[in-house]
Image (cartoon, rainbow, N blue to C red):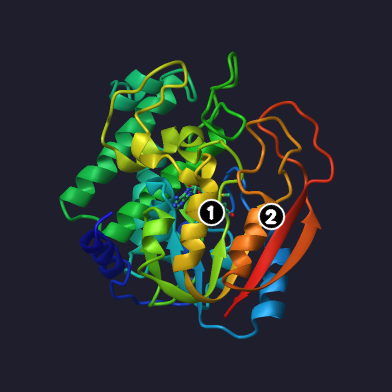
Amino acid sequence: MSVQTLERQKKNSRTSSSNIGLELVVNNQYSSSANYFSINNRRYLGNKYKLNEFIKKIISKECGKFESFADLFAGTGAVASMFQDKHLIVNDILYSNYICYQTWFGTEHYSQSKIQNYIQKYNTLIIKKDNYWSKNYGNTYFSKENCRKIGFIREDIEQNYSANNLNNREKCILITSLLYAMDKIANTCGHYDAYRKNGELNKDLVLGMPLIQKTNSRNEIYNTDINQLAKFVSADVVYLDPPYNSRQYCDAYHLLENIARWEKPDVYGVARKMDRTALKSDYCTISATKAFEDLIKNIQAKYIILSYNNMANKGNDRSNAKLSDDDIFRILKSKGKVKVFSQDYKAFSTGKSNIEENAERLFVCQCF
Ligand SMILES: C[S@@+](CC[C@H](N)C(=O)[O-])C[C@H]1O[C@@H](n2cnc3c(N)ncnc32)[C@H](O)[C@@H]1O
């Protein structure tokens, strides 16, 4: 990513705002027919939602008062969402996550009633004609009927954005609503490496209204490789939650990425994946240690907080952690004083291996 592109993202992420507390006011006009969803109502590998209290407690105790918080492998944004009163810097390599951050942490003004009207219209649609989405994904992760609806809605959002009927934040809010609605009914076990043969396809696609909180007008939202970004941003507290193993997030979430980007590429194989070459992460490969070392060297922060579990050699090959404890300590100690906190957490394995005593650890580095 070029410096100009980063500058553009920085400028876009700071568009003017009119913030009004919890921005979604559930008034009588809308409450009867709308359903609502919040940032954590989605399935995501490595999501820290259940560890939020533990993470918040340690950060508050160790870092004291601070003004800016950067969540740079932000995934769903669950951790950043605990610090909504701070100046947030949020980033992920996946564009589908970036779109969601515009909804949850964006600063551009949006019309709540306009969003509500679009959602009401989308929820009553019956689409008979095939489109890109139904031709490629019909009766796989979703029924043919739901795919026609998904493809129609996504195209409609794009056209209304091009016609200036929606601003960028409104476009992102509608796409976020579609992504969360899809995730709720997808015929999968929570990711898109495969769909269930003979699985249930007849659930209704129902879009909801996101419960958006007041956002800080200084928030910055990025969609780039963390090692590039680290050279340009700084924050009091930088939180890092890299992938642990060889499982690439772009493989697990290719389908949501395809909807978010809406470039309509060819898709291949049983799992209907698009080309994901540009989205592969070094942190899932043997280059992870080198990438981590380079990242820590460049980060400008008072505190670096790292989430990493203790899977070093406990699972199958695909589940094994890419960073060893020795390397984590060596690299963090070159940057500051290091403490480690841990909380036992249910094991995650991409295979069938049964892993006991899987602890999620939080490394706190107070930078020199
Ligand atoms: C363990 S998940 C983060 C989960 C997140 N803390 C949450 O609670 O949802 C790791 C995230 O890092 C992103 N990622 C992987 N490599 C990246 C890179 N080089 N730059 C930026 N983001 C990356 C993935 O797309 C994924 O969303």
Q: Mark 1 = which residue? A: 36
Quadrant of the drawing holding the C terminus: bottom right
Count numbered badges in the picture: 2
Q: Mark 2 = which residue? A: 326
Q: Secondary structure at mark 1?
A: strand
Q: Earlier in the sequence, mark 1 or mark 2?
A: 1
Q: Position of residue 252 (x, y in %)?
A: 51, 34
Give yes or no for contact between labels 1 and 2 (Cβ–Cβ under 8 Å): no
Q: Can residue 75 be seen in the rendering of this structure? A: no
Residue occupying image coordinates x 34% and y 39%: 278
Dot 2 amino acid type: Asp
Of residues 193 and 38, the one nearer the viewer is: 193
Of residues 24 and 343, the one nearer the viewer is: 343
- The residue lying furthest to the right in this view is 356
Q: Is residue 339 left or right of residue 9?
A: right
Residue occupying image coordinates x 28% and y 71%: 15
Residue occupying image coordinates x 58% and y 44%: 44
Quadrant of the drawing holding the N terminus: bottom left
Judge whether 221 appears above or below 87 on screen.
above
Dot 1 amino acid type: Tyr
Q: Position of residue 201 (x, y in %)?
A: 54, 22
Q: Secondary structure at mark 2?
A: helix
Which is closer to the viewer, label 1 or label 2? 2
Some atom of ligand 1 lies within 8 Å of the CB belonging to the residue at label 1: no
